[in-house]
Image: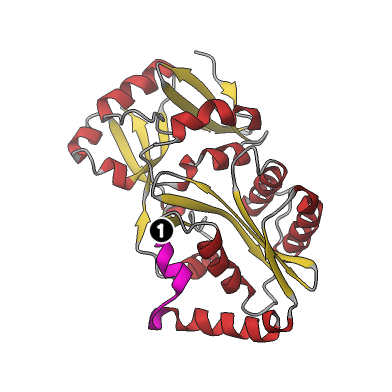
Amino acid sequence: MTFKSLEVSDYETLKNYFSDQPYNLSIYSLASLIAWSSQNFKTSFTLLNGICFMANEKEQDRGTRHLILPVSSQRIFEPSELHHYARELGYKRYSFVPGDYMERFDRMAWENFFTLTEQKEFEDYVYRTEDLAELKGNRYSKKRNLISQFKRNYLFYNRVSVESIRPEAVEECEKFIELWCEEHACSEEDQNSLACEKSALVKTLHHLDRLESMSILIRIDGVVSALGIGSRLNETTATLNFEKAFVEIKGLYQFLDNECAKRLFSSYRFINKESDMNLPDLAEAKKSYDPIHRVKSFELVVK
């Protein structure tokens, strides 16, 4: 069966498959899948009997070749079916299988067909939108204090504007990303996780409307200083795919996060902030917002 390389132009064709998909890991955001697909980390798909099958692999490492769970707005798939489809399509493994999805079936049902390995670096953080928008209680007192300092230093002097990212601002956003990357060593030559994220972010910026992404941009003294981009994951949950701000501006990250919750995700009950990619500073930041739960990720190897 032929798999087609996943492109931005495929969004319209595939979005109905993803409209009511049951998975809570952020990778199952169609906009995110498209953004992260590149020459170095290729995503491809095929359609069969109302089911979308997607495959990933790194160009220089054939051992990473895998499927993600099949996507359909009409049904879920039992372990025996997943085993059958993997063999039929010629794949030996599934990656990014959500732990909460696996709990729908008895563990023995999984172990009859697959060897299970937890992917701890891809465990997602999930929050209540209400918590991040209102920041109530002692657990968020430091966040509120930092936001108050930011407002006193910038907002109250009319130095701040908050807006959606419009096409005419994309070039400015790209310059901001370049500056941010200089601070965080996301070298494209190294192809590290931050470099891949940069590529995905730039692609998204150029196709915000086509990918139906939600966006926010913060200017300070007219200069782009922070941005956030999100997408629909499922009926109850949105994903905050990208969140960048100049770290030297005290309280800006906290202000941005709060504005994203209020402006972008008010119609969703939960916000998935993706994984920490095994980056200690990122993990600490995500934990500091007190997630209501973590969505585990598993790899399933066909027996």
**144 in relation to 203, above or below:** below
Residue 33 in view in this figure: yes
State the SS at label 1. Answer: strand
**205 in relation to 78, above or below:** below
- Residue 136 within the segment the image draws in magenta: yes
In which quadrant of the rendered view does residue 203 lie?
top right
Is 242 or 136 nearer to us in this picture?
136
Residue depicted at x 42% and y 46%:
25
Location of residue 165 in the rendering, given as x and y in whole percent from the top left corner = 70, 54
Location of residue 110 in the rendering, given as x and y in whole percent from the top left corner = 25, 35
Span of residues in magenta = 126-139
Residue 43 in view in this figure: no
Read off the residue under disc 1. 126
Is 239 or 89 nearer to us in this picture?
239
**142 in relation to 212, above or below:** below
Location of residue 55 in the rendering, given as x and y in whole percent from the top left corner = 50, 29
Report the number of numbered marks: 1
Position of the C terminus by quadrant:
top left
Q: Residues within 10 Å of mark 1 (few under 14, many from 20)?
A: many
- Residue 280 within the segment the image draws in magenta: no
**149 in relation to 133, above or below:** below
Is 267 or 183 nearer to us in this picture?
267
Lateral position of residue 183 relative to residue 66, left or right: right
Amino acid bearing label 1: Val
Location of residue 168 in the rendering, given as x and y in whole percent from the top left corner = 80, 50
Residue depicted at x 30% and y 47%:
100
Lateral position of residue 38 relative to residue 282, left or right: right
Residue depicted at x 43% and y 62%:
129
